Amino acid sequence: MLKEVEKKDVELSKQLDKRIAEKTEIIMKMTEVTEKIMKAKQEIAEVVDSERKITSEFEMLVPSNHPNRAQLLNSYKKKGHRKKVQPSTLSLF
């Protein structure tokens, strides 16, 4: 009877170790995902800020009663969505 209890104890101990390893892995994955979410939120905030700047600049340049305001607004917004060349990607030589 003692051997059966000991055998069961060893089995439960192995299961516990396995669950602890799984928990650690899940926590690591959660941390990675949380970091990705924070980066994405930061990028979103930057895009929103850029959009606000573009809109305010447009409002300063084009009066509200301009006959081609809608067309100008569309092309002006496209300006903000273009990718900018990163300095690190430029080759000087």
Image (cartoon, rainbow, N blue to C red):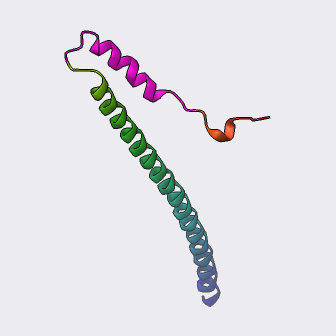
Query: In the image shown, does 15 or 35 lie closer to the viewer?
Result: 35
Residue located 33% across and 31% down the image: 57
Nearer to the camera, 38 or 24: 38
Residue at the image point whose x is 40% and y is 37% from the top:
50
**Residue at 39 percent of width and 45 percent of height:** 45
Image position, residue 9 (x, y; %): 59, 82
Q: Which residues are magenta?
A: 65-84
* Residue ranking furthest to the right: 93
Q: Is residue 6 left or right of residue 38?
A: right
Residue 93 is drawn in which quadrant? top right
Residue 61 falls in image quadrant:
top left
Relative to 12, say whether 41 is above or below.
Answer: above
Q: Is residue 31 above or below residue 40?
A: below
The majority secondary structure of the magenta stretch comes to helix
Quadrant including the N terminus: bottom right
Residue 77 in which image quadrant: top left
Residue 25 x/y as whole percent: 58, 63
Residue 7 inside the magenta-drawn segment: no
| Residue 81 location (% of width, % of height) | 46, 28
